[in-house]
Image: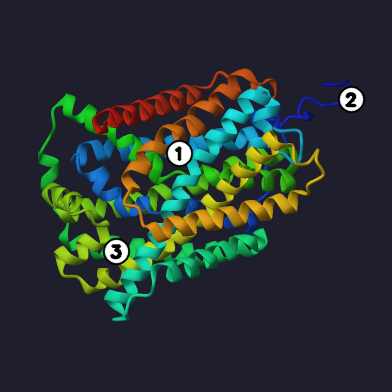
Amino acid sequence: MSSSQTPHEYSDTSTAAIEMNPNAPAKPKWNASDSTWTISLFGTAIGAGILFLPINAGSGGVWPLLLATIVIWPMIYFSHRALSRMVCASQNPDSDITNLTEQYFGVSIGRIFTVLYFCSIFPVLLIYGVGITNTVNSVMVNQLGMAPWPRWLLSGILVAVLTGVMLMNQKIMLTITNALVYPLILILLAVSVYLIPRWSFDSFSQAPSLGDFTLTFWLMLPVLVFSFYHAPAISQFSVSMRERYGLQSAAKASQILRATSTILVVFTMIFVWSCVLALGSEGVQEARESNLPILSFLANELDAPFIEILGPIVAITAISSSYFGHWLGAHEGAMGIIRSNFKTEEKGISKNKVSLAVSVVLFFCVWIAAILNPSILGLIETLVGPIMAVVLFLMPMYAIHKVEVLAPYRGKLTNVFVVIAGLAAFSAIVYKLGDLF
């Protein structure tokens, strides 16, 4: 500090130092753009996972689910915040997450991370293409009484519409995402309230042994991570924060992510608990064996036309909103792989041309997957899970430990928590893979 500065003045060129210093300038006031990003990140997280989360999370009983409800907020907030801090700290204004890993760790490790980042998102994007096709086809045939369309045509139209939204500018994409997410929140809340008269608390009298409790909770972690995962949108979100708020971007991003994590946990876990209490442990097990989304099972089991109508609406809005966030991440990852391996900029190939080519390839990949209709949702979730754990939990903590510009974040108990949570999620997935093979 220079002699001309008072003790309460603060000057630094690091977003990390500014965020962690109590004498730094106050964060800009909350505005409409912050609300838009909060809802967009919420929409990225709420995808196909929520349709199966009550079944997966409730199968082990209410006591492990209670512990999961307590720990899931810090798990998703601290991990996504760390990933965002990495991007905000980059001193290159054009750097996304694929650029900055090369800046932080060198070209070789940066390339490996870029591939891992892409592989954690791309398979999920394919599944959303399959999911939206199956859901709309079911509505057309079962609810509207229409003859089924050729799968190649229906899937092509749906994937083209979703992709077309992504090719618009970011403001339009965020507006459409928000338009999908608001009714989704209301519907989840409506279903949760509708089920209240059917709640039963008998499950709380069934206390598992310590060993069963620990194993059930441990194996539940990958499901929770997948269901709340919004890392695909974190990079572009953080770049937007850096452009808008400059050196205060990390502090503002943390504020928005805190709000996102809160509404995610509140609305999602209320929905999960309402479904689990309405079905009971035996009902949840029957739902798992039926291999149906929770709302479809509830509609059949409870003879509830209300849920039968809302089920497809929830599925379509949830998958569509999450598709947008995962498209951003997959596109970004593919661009990073091409840039680092083929040196397109050095060869004079414009970024716009590469971006368009990547978009076309992604469209055809998702379309082909939707036509083939693979029944591999559970397997895909399991295989991408380890990569998700590395990208979201472990890699940001390694960066904080090694990269000097992130040094102000070192020595925090939250870092230890994130590492332990990441290792637990990773090891649980490896354990499940051992059972599969």
Tell me the residue at 64%/24% (across/down). 108
Q: Are marks 1 and 2 in contact (CB under 8 Å)?
A: no
User: Looking at the image, can residue 46 be seen?
Assistant: no
For the residues labelled 1 and 3, say whether their Cβ atoms are less than 8 Å apart: no
Asked if 310 appears above or below 58 in the picture, the reply is below
Q: Nearer the viewer, residue 132 or 324?
A: 132
Callout 2: SS = loop
Mark 2 lies on residue? 4
Indicate whether 398 appears above or below 37: above
User: What mark, if any, has residue 240 been given in the picture?
Assistant: none
Which quadrant of the structure image shows residue 369?
bottom left
Q: Is residue 154 above or below residue 109?
A: below
Q: SS of the residue at dot 1?
A: helix
What x and y, as percent, mark residue 316?
40, 65
In the image, residue 33 above or below residue 281: below
Which mark, by number, is residue 191? 3
Label 2 sits on what residue type? Answer: Ser
- Side (left or right) of 226 relative to 257: left
Which of marks 2 and 1 precedes in the sequence?
2
* Residue 31 at x, y percent in the picture: 64, 56
Q: Residues within 10 Å of mark 1 (few under 14, many from 20)?
A: many
Measure the C-alpha gap from mark 1 to mark 3.
24 Å
The one of 422 and 146 positioned closer to us in this rendering: 146
For label 3, the SS is: helix
Please state if 187 lies on the left or on the right of 307 as rendered. Answer: right
Q: Residue at x 29, y 36 (%)?
A: 220
Under mark 1, the amino acid is: Ile
Looking at the rendered structure, the kind of residue marked 3 is: Val
Say whether residue 336 is visible: yes
Give the number of the disc on residue 76: 1
| Mark 2–mark 3 distance (CA, rounded to whole Å) | 61 Å
